[in-house]
Amino acid sequence: MERQQRRLSLAEVEALAREAHAAQTDKAGRPYAEHLAAVAHGVRARGGDAEQIAAAWLHDAIEDAALTEQWLADAPLSARTKDIVLALTKRSGETPRAYADRILATPGAALVKTADLAHNADPARLAVLDEPTRARLTRKYADMRALLGLGDDA
């Protein structure tokens, strides 16, 4: 009988994500870990469970090349957390519709994406960007909310 590997605690996932993204900043020049923390908080506030909170900390890790898909495959995380992270990882050339469909088809992923969109579209966060970037991102986030069937208050 195979012994089950101990899973990373949320504190360990947070520390790992903060370290993996340490050299990165967001579009406003803020430490990227601030975004991850906000998404994790948003997932918790929306009633998300520990697996979804872990996925929130890691939701951009593969896409941003902070961690590899192989790392994720081998990581001591639940299959559900891994599935959510992979669902939230945009693929090169992928249409927004295909991305949204994958999120909707993955249990638990839509709640994490909702928290991600809520932080990305925060007016205070967008206010520091130049007008063309702000307008482009506002449209992009609204389009994704629509594809996911979310209201404007997501």
Image (cartoon, rainbow, N blue to C red):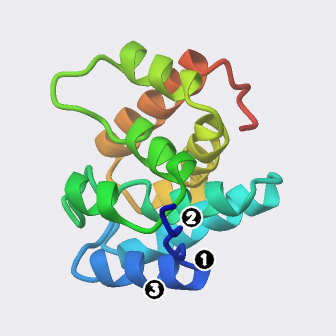
Residue 65: x and y, percent? 18, 59
Where residue 79 sits: x, y (%)? Answer: 51, 49
Residue sitting at x 59%, y 53%: 123
Q: Which amino acid does label 1 sit on?
A: Leu
Q: Residue at image x 69%, y 59%?
A: 42
Q: Indicate left or right for 13 with 10 as reference.
A: left
Residue wearing tag 3:
15
Tell me how far mark 2 sits from mark 1, CA to CA.
6 Å
Query: What element does badge 1 sit on?
Result: helix
Left or right of 108 on screen, residue 48: right
Query: Which residue matches tag 1?
Result: 10
Rendered view: 37 above or below 123? below
Q: Where is residue 119 in the image (x, y as percent from the top left)?
A: 58, 55
Query: Which amino acid, by three-letter code, is at mark 2?
Result: Ala
Of pointers 3 and 2, the one earlier in the residue sequence: 3
State the residue in front, 136 or 70.
70
**Neighbour tally class for label 3: few under 14, some 14-19, many 20 plus, Cα within 10 Å:** few
Residue found at x 51% / y 29%: 103
Q: Can residue 61 be seen by looking at this rendering?
A: no
- Mark 2: which secondary structure? helix
Position of residue 6 measured from the top left corner of the image (x, y, whole percent): 53, 76
Q: Which mark, by number, is residue 54? A: 2
Of labels 2 and 1, earlier in sequence is 1
Residue type at the position of mark 3 = Ala
Residue 126 in the image: above or below residue 26:
above
Position of residue 95 in the picture relative to residue 92 (left or right)? right
Is tag 3's residue or tag 1's residue first in the polypeptide sequence? Answer: 1
Residue 10: image quadrant is bottom right
Report the disc number at residue 154: none
Give the alpha-carbon distance from disc 3 to disc 1, as whole Å: 9 Å
How crowded pointer 2 is (Cα within 10 Å; few <14, some 14-19, many 20+) is rated as many
Q: Which residue is drawn at 41% across and 13% down?
A: 97
